[in-house]
Amino acid sequence: MMQSHIRQSGAAAAAAVALFSYCTAFGREGKKEENGSVGVHHLVAAALVEWRPPRRHAAISSAPLTSFYPNLAICEPIRDVESDNDDDDDDNDDNDSDVGFYYLRMNPKEVERTSLSDSHAIFGALSGTGMIERYDIYRRVLDDVAVERKPRGGSSRREVVIVNLSVGDKLNGHGGIVHGGILSLLFDEAMGWAYECLRHEDDWLDDPSSPVTAVTANLTVDFRAPFVEGSEGVIRVYHDERKGRKIYFTAKLESKDGEEMAKGSFLAIRMKYL
Ligand SMILES: CCCCCCCCCCCCCCCC(=O)SCCNC(=O)CCNC(=O)[C@H](O)C(C)(C)COP(=O)(O)OP(=O)(O)OC[C@H]1O[C@@H](n2cnc3c(N)ncnc32)[C@H](O)[C@@H]1OP(=O)(O)O
């Protein structure tokens, strides 16, 4: 109802830039700039009790609340990125360009695995100043029209999750360059969230009654450019294919300027007994 749509065709990059710019325009403490231009309306999830994401995130994560972790987010209309894209001519758009989506921020504290802050690598031991300073996960949600048009079956490549992240100066390999193992970790986690998001889609699991816990069986990362300490970036995870228990993903890490810093491919396998 209140959701705005980000145009998929030609505007995805703009959306990402807007998302990134917006996320990084505010401090980690979530202070909103005076006279900030984003998000005037908000819906608060009724079930939200303990944790509320800063408004800066809510502004890019408009969502009609669904049964999918219903207490994850405060919802506000997303920023209208179309206004940043005036080159687009509405009259000339074909139907496909009307397909829309928005991003919904996920809350790790709602999830048993990631809420184990003492033992979780990203949200626990390696979280903090100089280390993983930000790891904000957003599920990409299709609007109603897009859902209707979404290809069914196991081989529809699409972006599932993005992660807005920042890494400090204490996780390097070479001086000033973030350790490749750390980047692999960041990729691996992002893929895990993508899997979790997919498996909650009604039509996605061919056999919902079978075990749904998945683990990473294979992870390959190509490092394209040094990700320097103190950098911010965005990981985009794409679901490529599903073959029975095997789920294939690819991902890329983009710098703040949109440069591809690394890309990864993943195979997650649903376990037999968990
Ligand atoms: C909003 C909510 C957010 C939630 C937020 C939480 C998210 C939560 C998500 C969890 C994601 C966590 C993200 C961190 C992910 C880790 O870090 S997990 C930890 C690291 N990974 C592990 O410990 C896995 C260890 N390995 C294993 O347990 C087992 O080898 C596996 C992967 C379960 C496979 O064992 P298996 O089921 O016995 O496999 P098997 O029947 O032999 O083979 C099945 C198929 O897979 C193939 N295969 C098996 N292994 C491989 C391989 N390494 N390479 C290629 N193919 C393979 C086989 O060839 C076979 O293929 P088909 O013949 O069917 O075509």
Image (cartoon, helix red, strand yellow):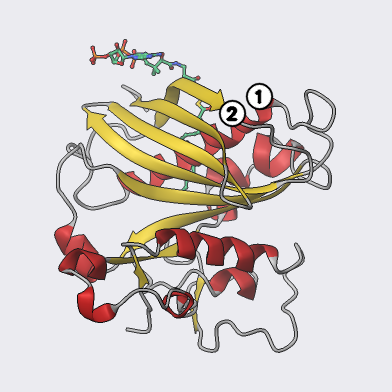
| Residue hosting label 2 | 184
**Within 10 Å of the Cα at label 2, are there few (<14), some (14-19), or many (20+) other Cα atoms?**
some
Mark 1 vs mark 2, CA separation in Å: 5 Å
Tell me where residue 250 sits by quadrant.
Answer: top left
Q: Which is nearer the eye, 112 or 186?
A: 186
Q: Position of residue 93 (x, y in %)?
A: 22, 72
- Secondary structure beneath disc 2? helix
- Secondary structure beneath disc 1? helix
Residue 68 shows in this picture: no
| Residue hosting label 1 | 181
Disc 2 marks which amino acid? Ser
In the image: residue 166, left or right of residue 197: right
202, above or below 272, in the image: below
- Ligand 1 quadrant assignment: top left
Q: Which residue is rendered at x = 30% and y = 32% of the image? A: 211
Residue 1 shows in this picture: yes
In the image: residue 267, left or right of residue 173: left
Disc 1 marks which amino acid? Gly
